[in-house]
Image (cartoon, rainbow, N blue to C red):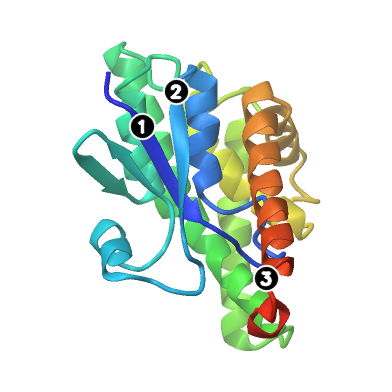
Amino acid sequence: MTELTLTTFDWVPEFPRGYVRDLRLSWAMEEAGLAYRIETVPFHERSEAHFAHQPFGQVPWLTDGDISIFESGAMLLHLGGRSETLLPADPARRSAAVSWLFAALNSVEPASLPLLIYKLADDAEQTPGRQRLDAFLQSRLGHMEQVLAGRDWLAGDFSIADIAMADVLRLLDRFGHLAGYPACRAYVRRAIARPAFIKAHTAQMEHFAAADLALAAKPGAAAST
């Protein structure tokens, strides 16, 4: 097999650490025992080469030989093709896992994104539009609560669907938005207790902590961050 390379930022501010989406991919590769390496691109500068791999100037992207893939769902699907640990071969179970992967990214995550935008903007005003967005999120979480009350994982065994969904839900949990959804919270707890998640999360935090030290060692760097 060709070598897998995961590209992320060389540094990010404190707020997103532990939640940068390269974690979804490193978690998956750790689950499957796939060998990979990490490369970085500058956070403060987005080169033409960066946009060639990721048209929106974001991270991560995954390279597999001559193939370059962006968007976490697409990358998870690609890795699923490499390992039945991530995506079962049985057609029915595979279809269920793929369906729930898309549900995480298309039905649940979009409902949570306004929360993050408001948080970043330090905006707590309860406008009518904000209230409708909150109601939409609560509706999505209510549906997920019913689903997760009756199962440990979304599609039978743990799969890429759970990596995506648990990562979406744990961001909501960070801000206390799963307090009324015990099955969702228990699901997140199960997911983040997995050794592969712990290893990937620790590696991301250590990566950015090392970047802080390197940045602090550069003369005048504090003024530019």
Numbered disc in front, either 3 or 1: 3
What amino acid is labelled 3 in the image?
A: Lys
Q: In the drawing, does residue 36 fall left or right of residue 145?
A: left
| Residue located beneath label 1 in the image | 4
Numbered disc in front, either 3 or 2: 3
Residue 125: horizontal and vertical position, in percent? 72, 88
Residue 41: horizontal and vertical position, in percent? 44, 59
Residue at mark 3 to residue at mark 1: CA–CA distance: 31 Å
Residue 37: horizontal and vertical position, in percent? 46, 34
- For marks 3 and 2, the one nearer the N-term is 2
Residue at mark 2 to residue at mark 1: CA–CA distance: 7 Å
Name above or below for residue 163 compared with residue 139. above
Q: Which mark is residue 218?
A: 3
Q: Quadrant of residue 14?
A: bottom right
Considering every residue shown, the one lying at the far left of the view is 66
Residue 26: horizontal and vertical position, in percent? 52, 35
- C-beta proximity under 8 Å, tags 2 and 1: yes
Query: Which residue is at 65% across, 77% downward?
Result: 120
Q: Quadrant of residue 213?
A: bottom right
| Residue located beneath label 2 in the image | 35
**Tag 2's secondary structure?**
loop
**Tag 1's secondary structure?**
strand
Considering every residue shown, the one lying at the far top of the view is 90
What amino acid is labelled 2 in the image?
A: Ala
- In which quadrant of the rendered image does the C terminus lie? bottom right
Considering every residue shown, the one lying at the far front of the view is 219
